[in-house]
Image (tube, rainbow, N blue to C red):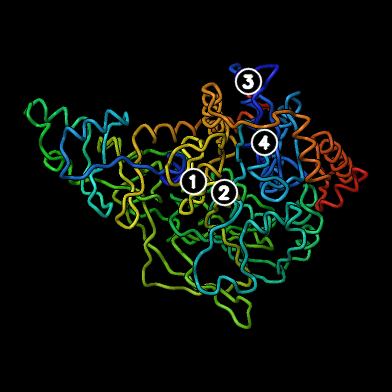
Amino acid sequence: MNIAHVLARKGGHVHTIRPEQTVREALAALARHNIGALVVVEQTDRPVGIISERDIVRALVEDEAMFARAVRDLMTRDVIVATPEDDLMSVAHTMTERRIRHLPVVVGGRLVGIVSIGDVVKAQRDQYEGEIATLQMQITDMPS
Amino acid sequence: MPQPGTEAQPLRVAIIGAGPSGFYAAEQLLSSPKLVATVDLFDRLPTPYGLVRYGVAPDHQKIKAVTAAYDKTAAHPRFRFFGNVEFGKHVSRRDLAAYYHQILFTTGAQTDRRMGIPGEDLGGSYPATDFVAWYNGHPDYVRHTFDLQQESAAVVGVGNVAVDVARILLRSPDELATTDIADYALDALRESRVRDVHLLGRRGPAQAAFTNPEIRELGDLSSSDVVVRPEEVALDDLSRAALDRTQDRTTMRKVEILQGFVTRPPAGRPRRLHIRFLVSPVEVRGADGRMTGLRLVHNVLQATPAGTLVARATDRFEDLAAGLVFRSVGYRGVPLPDVPFHQDWGVILNEKGRVLDPDSRQPVVGLYAAGWIKRGPTGVIGTNKPDAAETVDAMIEDAAQGSILDPTEPSAAAAEAFVRGRQPQVISYPDWLRLNQLEVEKGRALGRPRVKFTRVEEMLAALGR
């Protein structure tokens, strides 16, 4: 299974924000969409960073006036990105080892999707459940 | 008006495509404690089971036994089968909206990806799935012909379809004669002159998609020897590092099995399977409209930022003589009339099975997708069970909220009368069970699991139509 199969049932919509927007706007978008991170993109849909709830929490402790600052001041710039062809297993390992919870997916530099660690866990669980279901059917010739 | 989903007014669901996903979704809808649903399962073919009948290889009968579970679903009193009825030809989305509250598409991935290289359309070059559908007796492929007078055949890809094609080309016809392979295919394979089959993987042994049982089975064929190149089954540094990190035992075992073929002495069997890695075809070569071989480029592996090892072409090339090539480099769904489609991914545009409007990205009321047409072609048969469950959960949630279609005639009798009006030769489940019984009886006399009907006219005639 690869990342394209994970994205296929996510509708292809990614919540994004521009680097010049404020942290307050980012926080509002996170709450509104009930998500953990926004991909920061330029006009051309090129990802230039990612800003997560954790980034905001950490900054807030340091500086209570940070809401008015620009997203670009807070975002993580060296974003690891995936492509639709990346396999689920490699991505799962990379996310776990590097402690990344969100991975933007790009094709030719353009943002086409995002996978969260939750998506990866669900895809893996479905894969294992499917394999178990198949084996059960073969052993018993009947549904579980 | 009361909400549908009760004994008096059940939720009426049309499912398009009677493969595993269609049956799993039907089973989950019919057994839901949250509402009462009726399911009409449509298929463009007169026979149910989709790829279990027409994709799973004839020498893998044990896998085909999963149909027992589908028959159990079909025995439910609120289940009906409308076989030989094609969406987009006999019935449209608008038609169905007059009789059903929800429409679920489980039409699979019906077409193959092309390699996109020069010479791909020369004679002797075929999609692997055409060959699979042909040897499995799919009515649309009965008239296809494959030039099996060639001695060397290549199969591009190392997934389960590629492995099936290689195995059917290599297996002794006497063994195939005990399966439910189509009779015409068996006759053609008896005359086959194919001696060498080259299975071509673009990445290395640790990345090959085939399973360990599949590769062992290839090694155990009575009619062929396996040939591998030591340098191609050796682990490169990146793959070794990845395996050290993940401790993935299944993959380690796969590499060991493949490396084991290096030292295994050939048994002098009549056919040979060459399992190749780190090669990609860049051109199908030929003369006078017929292929004579493939030009291959040798690849090395490199890691993507997200950690996947992908193939990168080098400047080393090789010419492989082959009169036949079967491509199996991926599959994609076919767009359905009047249903939003995602061209890049080859699936119906959806979120957790709810079909989305391409402009607003909002769910289209009453339309759903499950299986390969929802997520793309991946996983084993059982993977469609949790996948269908996700969609069915969304369907039940939407029904509870009243977010469903508003049919003018939500009645089982009206729907059936309509379908029969459009396609008088509709096949019911009892009709199919009769066909199944005839196939099995015919097979029993010959020591075969069944002898398949391969033409729609034959099926109709057998039913006295």
How far apart in space, not on screen, are marks 1 and 4 (Cα)?
53 Å
Are the residues under marks 4 and 2 on the same chain?
yes
Q: Residue B5 got which mark?
A: 3
Q: Which residue is mark 1?
A: B254
Task: Report helix, strand or loop for mark 4.
Answer: loop
Judged by depth in the image, the label closer to the viewer, 3 or 4, is 4
Is B96 on the left-hand or right-hand side of B242? Answer: right
Residue B135 percent location from the top left of the image: 73, 55
- For label 4, the crowd category at 10 Å Cα-Cα, with few meaning under 14, some 14 to 19 and many 20 or more, is some
Three-letter amino acid code at disc 3?
Answer: Gly
Residue B328, above or below B98? below
Q: Which residue is mark 4?
A: B98
Q: Residue B215 got which mark?
A: 2
Provide the chain ID for the residue under circle 4.
B
Three-letter amino acid code at disc 2?
Answer: Ile
Provide the chain ID for the residue under circle 2.
B
- Viewer-closest of A78 and B43: B43
Provide the chain ID for the residue under circle 1.
B
Does label 2 or label 3 sit earlier along the sequence? 3
Query: Is there CB contact under 8 Å for labels 2 and 1?
Result: yes
Tell me the quarter of the picture where residue B38 sits.
Answer: top right
Residue at screen point 29% across, 38% down:
A102
Are the residues under marks 2 and 3 on the same chain?
yes
Residue at screen point 51% across, 38% down:
B364
Query: Is there CB contact under 8 Å for labels 1 and 3?
Result: no
Is B451 on the left-hand or right-hand side of A42? Answer: right
Q: Is residue B127 visible?
A: yes
Provide the chain ID for the residue under circle 3.
B
